[in-house]
Image (tube, rainbow, N blue to C red):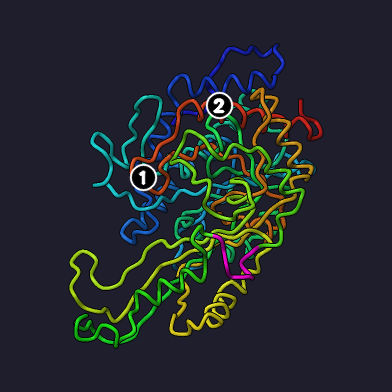
Amino acid sequence: MAIAGEASKGRTTSESPTRDGAIARAAGYFDEGSFKDDLAELVAFETESQNPERRGELSRYLEEAIRPRLTALGFDCEIFNNPDPRGGPLLVGERIEDPALETILTYGHGDVILGQTEQWREGLHPYKLVEEEGRLYGRGTADNKAQHLINLSALAAVLAERQRLGFNLKVVIETSEETGSAGLAEFFQQQKARLAADVLIASDGPRLQPETPTMFMGSRGGINFDLVVDFREGAHHSGNWGGLLAEPGTVLANAIAAIVDQRGQIQVPEWRPTSLSPAIRAALENLPVVGDSGPAVDEDWGERDLSPAERVYGWNSFAVLAMKSGIPEAPVNAISGWAKAHCQLRYVVGTDPDDIIPALRRHLDSCRLQAVKIVPADRGFFRATRLDPGSPWVTFVAASLEKTAGKAPHILPNLAGSLPNDTFSEILGLPTVWVPHSYRGCSQHAPNEHVIKATCRDALKVMAGLFWDIGTRSAGAG
């Protein structure tokens, strides 16, 4: 296991530590190949939190991969059992240099989704890091192992250069994020005093463009549910019974059409958020949502009067994730007795999370669709959060990133996806700033997941600069 601060050696004891020196150490750690080697070690842990057979890997990741790295950086570490039996263990690390200094909390998750080994293209394997054409492939590279490795390695670079951080740091690494962060909220309630801090600065999710730093200050919430139409046992001959029996697929299709129109505009009144203020629209103006990574954006999909950035970062979106009636792989001339769709609403601040399902029930009833049942998913989801883009911490982090990168970062009010940000903002009461190190075309949650090497190197530099600047603004830091 390499330590980032060991790179870019050469400063003598008579030389003063500098910001540039810390950034050079972080870049050297990458250039000498240590970042790739360390990431390969992390990827090799098959930390599938959705797979009960891999539960031991979650503990092993914290004990063998994370604790030694933090201990080498002067952290006191403790691994906790999850208060929720569905969740995996959690690690808390603390490096307290002076109680009078600012305290930063950072976070990462060591668990990954299922490997999907057979679906990866030839030459790749989810748990073996492979380099190809400037990319590093492996399950968990983008989500989230490379991201917390970058942050810990940038901290190591600052420590090696300055011999101290100049601030206090607390680290939380959980192993249940991919199953809804089971137990995280309860754990934070139990450990609220221990995790007290001034701000959360963490990394997850994608940059808008691989070459430009991105910040976001919260995330959309999410809720999953099934729409179920269950009329009768078995299927019945469509010739003998067609026109006599209510057809579940048609009823289900009408329910979906009542929720969104033909271009995906939300029709449930309470699902149309109230928070797309002039300030949020100004923050989203000219952000490059349309880019080279991922599929082409459908310009005529979603809320008609909103820009693409406003639709994905400032508005709610409904999706049918899966749908079935009868036997699609072997259809027969029979009217099915049932139909089901697994659906999701991604929602922003300004939507009452406790009224999402009740509002849908009222809406379907008003459309005479009482036969459609709504079954909430067993798995919990994260609530929507958003820090004011004018927060002093946002301004500070943005200035630091720009100083290192030589360009202004992209600043989002919230991530389009969902994170357990509400546990930090609501339970711990922290302002939250996320600086992601992946990109939108990373195949996160899919076969062939990867990170871009150049983006990782750039991220190491900007995070070393950011941690240096936090220490500099604290009393007594050089």
Tell me if 428 is positioned left or right of 451 in this view.
right
Q: Which residues are magenta?
A: 265-272
Tell me if 118 is positioned left or right of 81 in this view.
left
Residue 214 location (% of width, % of height): 61, 37
| Gap in angstroms between the C-alphas marked 2 and 1 | 25 Å
Q: Main secondary structure of the magenta part?
A: loop
Residue at point 57%, 57% (across, down): 420
Above or below for 110 versus 88: above
Tell me if 1 is positioned left or right of 99 in this view.
left
Residue 30 or 70: which is nearer the viewer? Answer: 30
Disc 1 secondary structure class: loop
Residue 124 location (% of width, % of height): 28, 36
Q: Quadrant of the C terminus?
A: top right
| Nearest to N terminus: mark 2 or mark 1 | 1
Residue 279 or 95: which is nearer the viewer? Answer: 279
331 is within the stretch colored magenta: no
Residue at point 59%, 59% (across, down): 316
Is residue 71 visible in the rendered image? The answer is: no
Q: Amino acid at mark 2?
A: Asp
Q: Identify the residue position indicated by label 2 in the image.
A: 458
Q: Identify the residue position indicated by label 1 in the image.
A: 45
Residue 349 or 1: which is nearer the viewer? Answer: 349
Above or below for 262 versus 228: above
Residue 257 location (% of width, % of height): 47, 69
Dot 1 surroundings within 10 Å: few (below 14), some, or many (20 or more)?
many
